[in-house]
Amino acid sequence: MKIRKDDKIKVIKGKDAGKQGKVLAINTNSSRVLVEGINIVKRHVKPGAVSKEGGIISIERSISLANVMLICPKCSAATRTEFKVMDNKKFRVCKKCKEVLKK
C-alpha cells in the first residue's frame, strides 16, 4: 500500500478534485480511504439511543484509493511513489525529488 494513515493527499478525480486532506483510515479490502474534509455527505438521523437529537448531520465517506495521490512533504507536489530497500528495510521514495518519505 503506497498511501498510509496520516499521509497528506490530494484528490485527483471526482466532485472534490483538487482538495487536499489528511488520511484518517484505510480499508485495504475494498481499496478505499477516508480523508478528513473530503466527500462530505448529509445523513438524516432519527432521535434514538445513538443520538439524542434527530436531524441532518454531515459525515465523511470513503473515497476510492485510485482517486487520490500522495503529496510529498519536501517538494509539496502530488507525486507517485516507489519502494527502495536500504539496510534490509523497505522505504517509500518520492518519484519527483527522490526524497525518502518518513514512517
Image: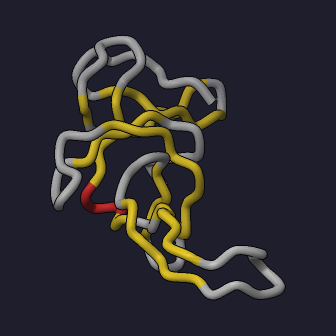
63 in relation to 13, above or below: below
| Residue lying at the far right of the rendered structure | 49
48 in relation to 40, above or below: below
Rendered residue at 18%/49% (across/down): 17
76 in relation to 52, above or below: above
Residue 81 shows in this picture? no
Residue 12 located left or right of residue 45:
left
Residue 75 located left or right of residue 58:
left
Task: Name the residue nearer the viewer: 76 or 43.
Answer: 43
89 in relation to 97, above or below: below
Rendered residue at 49%/59% (across/down): 34
Task: Name the residue nearer the viewer: 99 or 78.
Answer: 78
x and y percent of residue 102 in the render?
Answer: 57, 24
Residue 68 located left or right of residue 8:
left
Rendered residue at 26%/47% (across/down): 11
x and y percent of residue 66 in the render?
Answer: 27, 61
